[in-house]
């Protein structure tokens, strides 16, 4: 309080040192940034283990695949896991960007912004690489063809 007798001085909150509370650094935002950084690292480590496990499982399924059986679904499992991990990592890093902007920390914004970009690029690239092989020709060319007789034209039907 400044002590000049104005009514607004009665409502001003001050800390132990007498400084206004709103001017103090908000420690909880720094703690939240730390929690988000640890959460992002945990998601990244979990992602590495999940993708490596999916790749090893996919390789094992393909190595033990017997002709005539249904093809292994390791590729689909990998794609589902990569998409979920990409979403999770991007959201956690996005929270870090928002907290960094709110706190006014340029380094946090840059680091978490880079983490968003890296997680999206790596995740979506891995998702695209794990896509099914697609032939160069349209799928309808592989479908069995029926015999169609057109009136007035020569027929290929037996």
Image: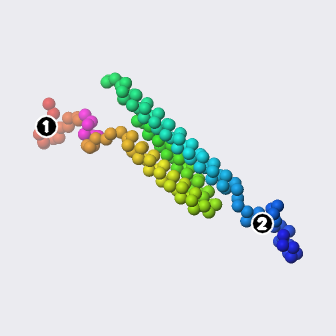
> Could you say which is closer to the camera, residue 123 or residue 136?
123
**Residue 73 in view, yes or no:** no
Residue 155's disc is 1
Residue 72 at what x, y percent from top left? 39, 29
Residue 148 versus residue 60 in the image, above or below: below
Residue at the image point whose x is 56% and y is 47% from the top: 40
- Secondary structure, mark 1, is loop
Q: What range is drawn magenta here?
A: 139-144
Q: Quadrant of the N terminus?
A: bottom right
- As measured in the structure, the alpha-carbon distance from the residue carrying label 1 to the one carrying label 2 is 93 Å
Tell me, yes or no, whether the highlighted magenta stretch contains residue 114: no
Of the two numbered discs 1 and 2 on the same chain, state the one appearing first in sequence: 2
Q: Which residue is mark 2?
A: 20
How many residues crowd around disc 1 within 10 Å: few (fewer than 14), some, or many (20 or more)? few
Residue at the image point whose x is 51% and y is 52% from the top: 115
> Could you say which is closer to the camera, residue 15 or residue 13?
15
Residue 32 versus residue 47 in the image, above or below: below
Residue 125 appears left or right of 8 = left
- Secondary structure, mark 2, is loop
Q: Nearer the viewer, mark 1 or mark 2?
A: 2
């Amino acid at each position: 309080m400044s002590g000049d007798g104005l009514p607004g001085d009665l409502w001003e909150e001050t800390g132990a040192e007498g400084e206004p509370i709103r001017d103090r650094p908000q420690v909880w935002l720094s703690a939240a940034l730390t929690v988000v950084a640890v959460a992002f690292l945990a998601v990244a480590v979990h992602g590495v283990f999940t993708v490596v496990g999916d790749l090893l499982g996919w390789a094992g399924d393909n190595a033990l695949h017997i002709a005539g059986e249904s093809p292994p679904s390791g590729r689909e499992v990998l794609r589902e896991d990569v998409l979920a991990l990409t979403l999770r990592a991007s959201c956690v890093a996005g929270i870090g960007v928002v907290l960094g902007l709110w706190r006014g920390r340029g380094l946090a914004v840059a680091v978490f912004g880079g983490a968003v970009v890296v997680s999206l690029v790596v995740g979506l690239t891995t998702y695209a690489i794990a896509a099914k092989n697609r032939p160069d020709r349209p799928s309808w060319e592989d479908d069995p063809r029926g015999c169609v007789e057109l009136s007035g034209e020569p027929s290929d039907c037996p």
